[in-house]
Image (spheres, rainbow, N blue to C red):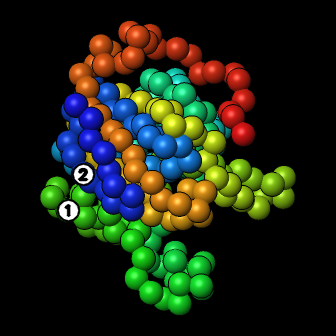
Amino acid sequence: MSTTLAPQTGTGFLLRAGQVLTVTDLQGGQVSDLFCFNADDHEEKLSGGRTIDYANTIFLTTGHVLYSNRSAPMLTVVEDTCGRHDFLLTPCSQDTFDLLYPEFEGAYHPSCLENLSTGLAQFGVQPDQIGTTLNIFMNVWPEPGGELHIDPPTSVAGDRFSVRAEMDLHVGLTACSAEKSNGGVCKPIEFAVSEGEHALRGGLKFEPVSEEPPRG
């Protein structure tokens, strides 16, 4: 059974080892932020730095493993129909909008950090424990000189991203709240949790990392 996150909202849930989480972009062009903790020890959590270091790429796709700060596998990407995601930028927060979007004049704005914090609070997670998120479908790319660009996502309606849990996890997931990251309009995100390989569409087998460049 699938669940739909309304625009600019989020949730938290337990993902058991071996279960598969599938995130689907229902309308196209919508980012979903993901962060997770070892369900038995919140000192162990998702690490973008470790993951990028071991993958030797900032463009993660099918076959890549997402590691914890202790270098333990937390999630394995088992399906990716988009090919462009970000693991460099932190979840948007009220501070993000205050510092980078002066046009909002300091007004309250929904944020992924707030939504992740709310979703994970049931497990005793504090906001300061949440680090750099895996920003599913987010289109971030660097200039040769290092400048980062945030372009509209390349994902189209129905694109999906599936990860298999390698340990029991407390997961936070959002439908991203930053208009700029989502082509100017925030949209819903669908997710589903299934048991093992039978959940993967068409009996998908584990494949090695694709050598094809991401779309966009």
Q: Quadrant of the N terminus?
A: top left
Q: Quadrant of the C terminus?
A: top right
Amino acid type shown at disc 1: Ala
The secondary structure type at the circle numbered 1 is helix
Q: Nearest the camera: 209 or 181?
A: 181
Q: Are marks 2 and 1 in contact (CB under 8 Å)?
A: yes
Q: Nearer the viewer, residue 24 or 210?
A: 24
CA distance for labels 2 and 1: 8 Å
The residue pinned by badge 2 equals 12
Q: Is residue 47 left or right of residue 192?
A: right
Identify the residue at horizontal 39%, vertical 71% (top origin).
110
Left or right: where does residue 66 sit relative to residue 3?
right
Whole-percent x, y for residue 106 in the image = 48, 88
Residue under pointer 1: 121
Quarter where residue 162 is shown: top left
The disc labelled 2 sits on which kind of residue? Gly
Disc 2 packing (10 Å; few <14; some 14–19; many ≥20): many
* Position of residue 92 measured from the top left corner of the image (x, y, whole percent): 48, 66
Q: Is residue 141 visible?
A: yes
